[in-house]
Amino acid sequence: MGKAEDERLQRYFDGELSPEERGQVEAALTEDDRLKLAALGEVRGLVANALAAEAADVDLWPGIAQKLGGGGKAAAKPRRRWGLRAHPASWSAGLVSLAAAALLLVVQPWHSQHAQNGCDIESLETTGAVATVIHMDDTPHRGDEATTVIWTTEDD
Amino acid sequence: MEPDDRKLVEDARRGDATAFRELVTRHQRRAFAVALGMVHDPDDARDICQEAFLKVHKNLSTFEGDAQFFTWLYRIVVNLAIDHLRKRRGQKVEFDDTQANDEPDEGGIAPHRTGFDPARALADKELRNQILAALDKLTPAHRTVLVMREVEGLSYQEMADTMKCSIGTIMSRLFHARKKMQQMLIAYRKAATPAA
């Protein structure tokens, strides 16, 4: 078989032939052609798997975050997010969860003058982390269906 | 349900660093695999990918919504890797079509397999080293098309666009690259298998 036939076989292997051409190649496939196709598949599998395995544990983010500076540093560690429904019982459950995460939370007095967004808790103080409270009134006409989200970011 | 890339790009554009981190986490392995296949050195591949992501971050505002994020990232990675190879080896004409194609025809793909199970490459570090060493022996032009095709499955047209050459050149480079990889892996197999 000449180089032209091999290149045509390669195009077949790569899915670069029209349906009509594919049919022509398949109709004329010899045993050698099938072995060549198997060999091409083997090389593909070896190269792809070797590179995928070498890349499996790569973590580029620390270097990227460092070069991004402040913005990257702020997100250098994933922020953990808890979504709490605004029911008293859920608050308790949420706080228990936070305690279980070894965060010491001090619930500051909630002042009515700060509850401009309808959130009962204005802020949380933590040791080893910074907590931010966001109230999302996603269903404003259904009272207690609103969601409060607490974000914590570990201190560096 | 996880947000798609487009949503993450939109969020990252608005300054959401967590969204950008998710894009990095999601695509870093594919990008690294491509870069490593092209430049061989893991540290260089890491630098190239980090630089590519930084370029992406800087140009998020130019990203077109109907494009694929990884395709965009991928082109940056490939171009940075090509630039890196040119600088490292000091061969300005290394990607010249003449040099890449001006080779004696030593026959086609051999009609037999190397004998290595591709799945073994996932777990066998020694085999991976041999595969990477074989890749490194290819010319950068051959290596680049092989990685683009076998790792990312780019079409001939996409590869031609990326490397700014004709489809015929891509086909020829791919043909030679595969043939040489097959020959090197068969030789390694023979060397690694004790004589009966």
Image: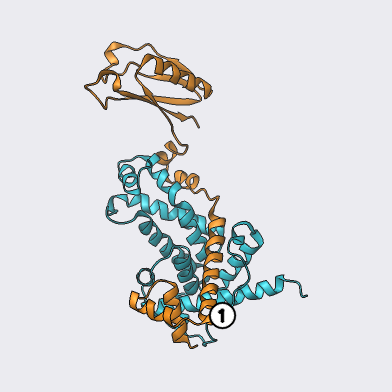
Chain colours: A orange, B cyan
In this rendering, would B133 be left or right of B141? right
Front position in the image: B67 or A43: A43
Residue that extends furthest to the front in the rendered view of this protein: A27
* Camera-nearest residue between B106 and A20: A20
Q: Chain of mark 1?
A: B
Q: Residue at x 53, y 81 (%)?
A: A31
Residue B69, given in percent of the width and then of the height, sits at: 35, 54
Dot 1 surroundings within 10 Å: few (below 14), some, or many (20 or more)? some
Picture residue at 67% right of the left edge, 72% below the top: B189
Does residue A49 lie above or below A108 as drawn? below
Q: Is residue A153 visible?
A: yes
Residue A28 lies left or right of residue A51; in this view the side is: left
Let me know if residue B96 appears in the view.
Answer: no
Position in image of residue A147 (x %, y %): 33, 24
| B118 or B83, nearer to the observer | B118
SS assignment at label 1: loop
Q: Quarter of the image containing the C terminus of chain B?
A: bottom right
Kindly identify which residue carries mark 1. Answer: B111
Give left or right: position of A78 versus B165.
Answer: right
